[in-house]
Image (tube, helix red, strand yellow):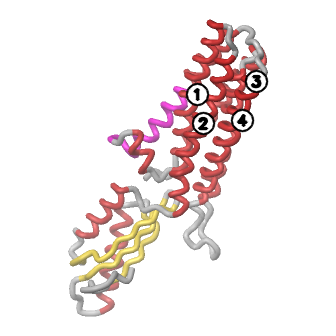
Amino acid sequence: MKEESPKAIFYALAANFGIAVCKFGAAAFTGSGAMFAEAIHSTADCGNQLLLLLGLKRARAPANALHPLGSGREIYFYALIVALLLFFVGGAFSVYEGAHRLMHHEPLSNPIVALVILGISVVLEAFSLAGAIREIRKGAPNKTLWRWFRETRESELLVVAGEDVAALLGLAIAFAAVLMTMLTGNTAYDAAGSIGVGVLLMIIAFLVAREVKSMIVGESASPEVRKAIDAHLRARPEITRIISLITLQWGKHVVVAVQAEMIDYASGRAMIDAINIIEDDLQRVFPQVRWVFFEPDIARDRGEPAL
């Protein structure tokens, strides 16, 4: 797992700032509800990226007596806040704005301007999404995006990718809404577009929040990392059997707890030296493993293992 993924956040922040300025100008010029909803969405995204950067900074705080394993999981808290903001500030507000305009029809002026701005926004959002995908592919070159979404432990990159996908789909909805309003003269399409953008944002926010909640509760290392750690330990000549293996993702680091049968040693000191060698080698092969708790034991015939 990479140390962190701030590049994707900076890509998204730059793109969303430019997009928000353009959208607010276009919304004021055209009176489009769908465009205004998109402008609010992009502004919320800017705030979200700043929160993620703050979360990454705070997650690097060193361990102390109160937080003996460090603050690595603090980024999960900020990612959850971002998901909630995306749901309420972006999604719920867009639905409200669309419902309001559906009841109070307001004609569009210069819809061509709105379409041009939406087209520019698509290019900028595509730039942001491309940056996020490049970061994703560095760590998961062969996974589908959906499988990566379900298995990743990088909450900040998960949020950025979710926002970018929501933004591109939202732009498509807004473009279609403005275009239909321009062609038919029926402002209900514009209002419906705002509602559609809001519903989309709430769905994406729910999916992101679900994944982040699982990280906060406590997830193992990603399946491929856990499998690799298990295989590495089983291949060690000092170990005859793995009784129990627990991995826990802690921000960008991993906690490993191992219960294993060892070969016979002449003394307790010799076994301790062997365990130290195993732990050092594990951390050399897997740099993300910050803590290793190793317990030599004998497998029980009945009952659950002690670990």
Mark nearer the N terminus (2 vs 3): 3
Q: Mark 1 points at which residue?
A: 170
Position of 123 with respect to 139 (left or right) is right
Residue at the location (28% across, 93% down)? Answer: 267
Inter-mark Cα distance, 3 to 4: 16 Å
Identify the residue at horizontal 64%, vertical 74% (top origin): 66
Q: How far apart are marks 4 and 2 (CA)?
A: 10 Å
Q: Which residue lies furthest to the front in this view?
A: 103
Q: In which quarter of the image is the C terminus?
A: bottom left
Element on which disc 1 rests? helix
User: Could you tell whether 258 is left or right of 242 in the image?
Assistant: right
Answer above or below: position of 99 versus 254.
Answer: above
Q: Position of residue 144 (x, y in %)?
A: 36, 39
Q: Quick check: marks 1 and 4 in contact, CB under 8 Å?
A: no
Amino acid under label 4?
A: Phe
In the picture of the structure, the residue carrying the numbered disc 3 is: 103
Would you call the spot at circle 1 few (<14 residues within 10 Å), some (14-19), or many (20 or more)?
many
User: Which mark, by number, is residue 267?
Assistant: none
